[in-house]
Amino acid sequence: MKHITLNNGLDVPAIGLGTWKSAPGEVGKAVKEAIRMGYRHIDCAAIYGNEKEIGEAFKQVFDEGVVSREDLWITSKLWNNAHQKDRVIPALEQTLSDLQLNYLDLYLIHWPVAFKPDVINATKAEDFLSLEEVPVNETWKMMETAQEKGLTKGIGVSNFSIKKLKSLLDSCQIKPVMNQVEMHPYLPQNALVSFCFENEIALTAYSPLGSGDRPAAMKKDDEPGLMAIPAVKEIAANHHCTPAQVLISWHVHRDCCVIPKSTNPERLEQNIKSATIALNKHDMETLAGIEKSYRFVDGSFFELEGNGYTNVFDL
Ligand code: A2P
């Protein structure tokens, strides 16, 4: 498995397991199966609502001696309602308690969007706090404190634009090691990838397969399917693999991490085996040619009239 080296010197396995939308009652089993078949990078978040069950799974694989804590790369994310200075460390401590861990490998600010403390899913403008009230750079200072306290080995962000990263880089003591964003051939994020690489920030691709299992409220009619793109299917046929494996392998070839979600044993196996697929220059050029600036997770759920967040991907 290829590893990506971060600016703090740590190596993260390029292919990890996504756990967004992995249902309670299924996610623990999937995490255990994944670790047994060789996954060493697990991507979590408090808002996914399944960290307790994942924590039980970690405990079991550690107790059974399948792997030890140091063998795994574990990421989690700070939810939007815990951006205030006094809420960052308690949120991380809650995640550590749920995951039954002493430390994370990576803790990310999930979105550059702040909610009031008692709000989990914001549905009206009053649920939000403005970025003037809770500046991201202030939240970042507490992320730095979390790292200094040894609660996490690295800190980073998710869903951050170039503009937001620039502002963070101007004021931070510890540089973010990672920006996790939606990325796939329809949304290659070329400018963001160039900026991040120039500034030694690695990238992780979420929704690499188009997240077809998103809640209906997050879906539009006539969404294009990544796995049905003729060029992707043709490349898959040439390599005797599946379209999903082509989509996963593409990130590895671009030196990015990728976290496909599955709770199905065959697909878990298929996804990690994408690490062995050698796409050629022509395949990469073909995949680079199908961009259409299409987002599956378009952020509109944070863009309510009067809440001050007009385009969350361009803040
Ligand atoms: P399942 O969990 O039943 O395998 P994303 O990673 O972009 O969020 O996409 C996750 C969705 O893609 C889930 O619906 C998941 O279903 C499905 N999926 C995961 N791996 C594969 C695969 N190899 N082939 C087809 N669908 C897959």
Image: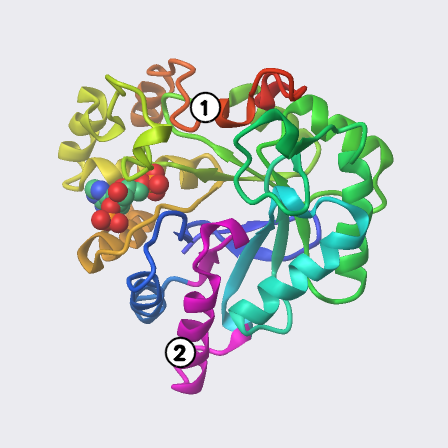
Q: In the structure shown, which secondary structural element does the residue marked by tag 2 occupy? A: helix
Image height of 4 relative to 99, above or below: above
Q: Position of residue 103 (x, y in %)?
A: 64, 68
Residue ID at (53%, 75%): 69
Q: Position of residue 7 (x, y in %)?
A: 69, 47
Find the magenta span and give its range.
Answer: 40-69
Horizontal side, residue 133 vs residue 63: left or right: right
Relative to residue 217, is residue 257 depicted above or below? below
The residue that label 2 is drawn on is 61
Amino acid type at circle 2 is: Val
Q: Quadrant of residue 224?
A: top left
| Residue density around tag 1, few if under 14, some if 14–19, many if 20 or more, within 10 Å | some
Which residue is tagged 1?
298
Q: Is residue 93 left or right of residue 173?
A: left
Which quadrant of the render holds ligand 1? top left
Residue 107: percent from left, percent from top:
63, 53
Indicate whether 123 appears above or below 101. Answer: above
Q: Quadrant of the C terminus?
A: top right
Does the segment drawn in magenta span residue 42? yes
Q: Position of residue 268 (x, y in %)?
A: 26, 55
- The Cα atoms of the two marked residues, 2 and 1, are separated by 36 Å
Q: Is residue 243 visible?
A: yes
* Residue drawn at the location 28% of the way across and 39% of the way down: 213
Q: What secondary structure is found at the residue carrying circle 1? A: loop
Residue 112 is drawn in which quadrant? top right
Q: Name the residue rendered at 39%, 29% in the picture.
A: 184
Residue 29 in the figure: left or right of residue 202 = left
Query: Which quarter shows the N terminus?
Result: bottom left
- Say which of marks 2 and 1 sits in front: 1
Residue 291 found in image quarter = top left
Is 187 one of the magenta-colored residues?
A: no
Query: Is residue 147 placed above or below 248 in the rendered structure?
Result: below
